Image: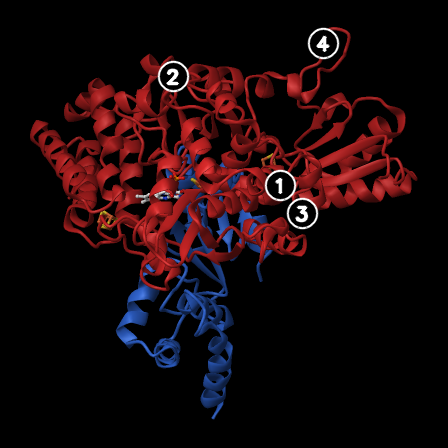
Amino acid sequence: MKYYRAHVLICSGSNCAIKGCRSVKQACEQEIIRHGLQGEVQVVDTGCLGLCDQGPALVVYPEGVMYGRLTPSDVLEIVSEHLLKGRLVHRLMQQPTGPAGEVSPLSMTPFFQKQKRVVLKNCGLIDPERIEDYVRAGGYTALATALDVMTPESVIAEITQSGLRGRGGAGFPTGRKWEYTRVAAGQQKYVICNADEGEPGTFKDRLILEGDPHLIVEGMALAGYAIGATRGIVYIRGEYELSIHRMEQAIRQARENGLLGEGILSSAFSFDLEVCAGAGAYVCGEETALIESIEGNRGEPRFKPPYPVEKGLWGQPTSVNNVETLANVPSIIEQGALWYRSLGTPSSPGTKVFTLTGNIVNSGLIEVPMGITLREVIYEIGGGIPEGKQFKMAQTGGTSGGCLAAAHLDIPMDYDSLQSHGSSLGSGALLIMDDTHCIVDLTRCFLKFFVHESCGQCTPCREGAPALYHLLGKVSAGAGGHADIQLINRLSRTMQSSSLCALGQTAPVPVLSALQHFWPEIEAHLNGRCPANKCVMGKAAGKIAN
Amino acid sequence: MAERQANFSHRQMILPFVDQPGGLLKALHALQNASLDHFLAPSDLKLVAEVFGVPEAKVWGTVTFYSLYSTSPRGRHIIRVCESAPCYVVGAMDILKSLGAMLNVQPGETTSDGRFTLEVASCLGVCGVAPALMVNMDVHGNLTRDKLAAILAEYA
Ligand SMILES: Cc1cc2nc3c(=O)[nH]c(=O)nc-3n(C[C@H](O)[C@H](O)[C@H](O)COP(=O)(O)O)c2cc1C
Ligand code: SF4
Ligand code: FES
Ligand code: FES
């Protein structure tokens, strides 16, 4: 192996690609050659570093210095100063320096210190296009161990003991799902990786697939071994071109190396994967709709039961698992259930990947132990609210999650405590809003999403979502009264109890939590006043209301 | 004659998908990508129904379900502005309004020269750089009003 004195890791994730990381990388490589450093410095493409807001970004190792918001011309300076002369380019640095100008490595900055990286352990550190890099980082040892010394039942037992719960939203225990699929009768069982990611504010699965695709190949192979499936499908949202490309490439590489296909690693276990691209419908992320879509139909949710673990793809037992769920599996097999339980809280062990969006300084991707407080995430990792504004509210769990107020900043974020406060952990989307926003206006924005995305199959959701949207429009216009609020409450309960799938069941969650936690502000609207001055009141707004 | 030829090449294009799981959606993808106006014409749907041996109504039902398919002709370039909450709170509506004014269209409409169709979309999965939009398959993020003209200029 060749030895390099320095490594330049450039994020090639989607958020950075949008901001031109290709040309930054090209400039970097050209400059390194121009200075004759190509034998000493290696430039590596890597996955998301987490600070997407500061992209395009690169990290120079061994120092662990991150440079951000780069243009190709900035890179000339980094090469000639840092790489050639060993002098830091403070102007472009994204981490604080000490009194004597010393830098602490990236991993020691507040942004990373509070994080615990299990799922993202390789993201931003390896080249996702090279299976060698994944293997060098310890990849595929969990699969090898399982095939060598564990029975499928003991794999399931380990996952069950770890307490891993599904990261796609519902938080169902993964071990139990696998157990059900294993014991269900059927000739051909399937593992499906759900990467249809459409919950607004969520982009973790995309960045995991882009940053460490082999982790998902390994997780799925372990799932296949555990439940007795020989085939798996990765269902990836159609817009995620880079994820699709990286996943297909990882599958090819794994096959070439005997890690997928017939008799994996000389064992009796055979397993193969294929990628299926979605066609743009949020509801297809619902597991039975996703199965319909793979079968080439309209992606309408099926009535449950039967659940996919009994009758899933082509009527066969199927385990549908989220990307992040599967990404946890290799580490659990390798390090054990006890280790996993040492992270997080008793009812929600492990870590959670969150995406930070909205009015927050560091928008991007983080991974923290379950049970961390909202305050720590927003102020210590997220850097607080920009432009000196005040925190007003946070929506956890994406658009189908609830709105929390400043009084909730210290509740632990895990499945159960968020639920008990009328919200949910959901997909891990965290939308932060400052005090310039209006609760009624935002709630309308949330509702509009469901009006668009309802598949229309069942009445409570098809008719209920537009009705709620309309009622909120009335309140926003200052034309609403207490009777409308009552109606909103009644409609919401009906949708929750009688919609066919979780889309319709959760659509009212943001509305109900707004009523619960922001009542004075809503009441002001009933009296013709929008405290945040966002809603257009009175006659001018009459048209919207009707 | 030209139509027959097109029909023939379209048939060739989708035949490989017939035996694949979920091949119907892949065939529709291929046909729409081959269409200069980014849409699926009634003749395309008829062809798919015939080749796959399913009722035409089922093909229609499938096509109208997914947002990536269109059954009416669209501009050469399709702009999709994300209006989901994370983009909304950092100014997506300003972007949409500005674009509408620059192109002189409402969401859903195509410019008179057929260059752009303006659409609104739900979260595009790049909220880390909100507000965001896609032109065809390219994503543009961290949008401000001043950036829009330069973005449009990239698409002739
Ligand atoms: C409308 C709707 C959208 C969903 N979207 C997703 C999604 O994008 N990704 C996902 O993993 N799960 C999604 N789910 C949850 C899935 O139905 C399913 O519970 C999940 O994939 C199971 O995996 P897990 O146990 O690993 O979480 C969605 C559910 C609903 C109702
Ligand atoms: S609840 Fe909504 S999305 Fe779910 S099946 Fe009913 S109409 Fe479709
Ligand atoms: S995508 Fe580059 S830092 Fe997140
Ligand atoms: S909310 Fe706009 S890209 Fe996600």
Q: Position of residue B31 (x, y in %)?
A: 46, 72
Q: Which amino acid does label 2 sit on?
A: Pro
Please name which of the two marks, 1 or 2, marks the residue nearer to the observer.
1
Q: Where is residue A151 in the image (x, y as percent from the top left)?
A: 49, 40
Please name which of the two marks, 1 or 3, marks the residue nearer to the observer.
1
Residue A264 appears left or right of B127: right
Q: Which residue is drawn at 90% across and 42% down?
A: A34
Q: Residue A176 carries which label?
A: none
Mark 1 neighbour density, 10 Å: few (under 14) some (14–19) many (20 or more): many
Which residue carries the number 2 mark?
Answer: A412
Labels 1 and 4: the sequence-earlier one: 4
Q: Which residue is drawn at 77% across and 7% down?
A: A100
Q: Which of B86 and A280 is in front in this view?
A: A280
Q: Distance between the residues labelled 1 and 3?
A: 15 Å
Which residue carries the number 3 mark?
Answer: A129
Q: Residue A98 carries which label?
A: 4
Labels 1 and 2: the sequence-earlier one: 1
Whether callout 1 and callout 2 share a subunit is answered yes
Q: Which amino acid does label 3 sit on?
A: Glu
Mark 3 neighbour density, 10 Å: few (under 14) some (14–19) many (20 or more): many
Labels 2 and 3: the sequence-earlier one: 3
- Chain coloured blue in the rendered structure: B
Chain of the residue under label 1: A
Chain of the residue under label 4: A
Q: How far apart are marks 1 and 4 (CA)?
A: 40 Å
Q: Say what secondary structure mark 4 lies in.
A: loop
Which residue carries the number 1 mark?
Answer: A140
In terms of image quadrants, where is residue B119? Answer: bottom left
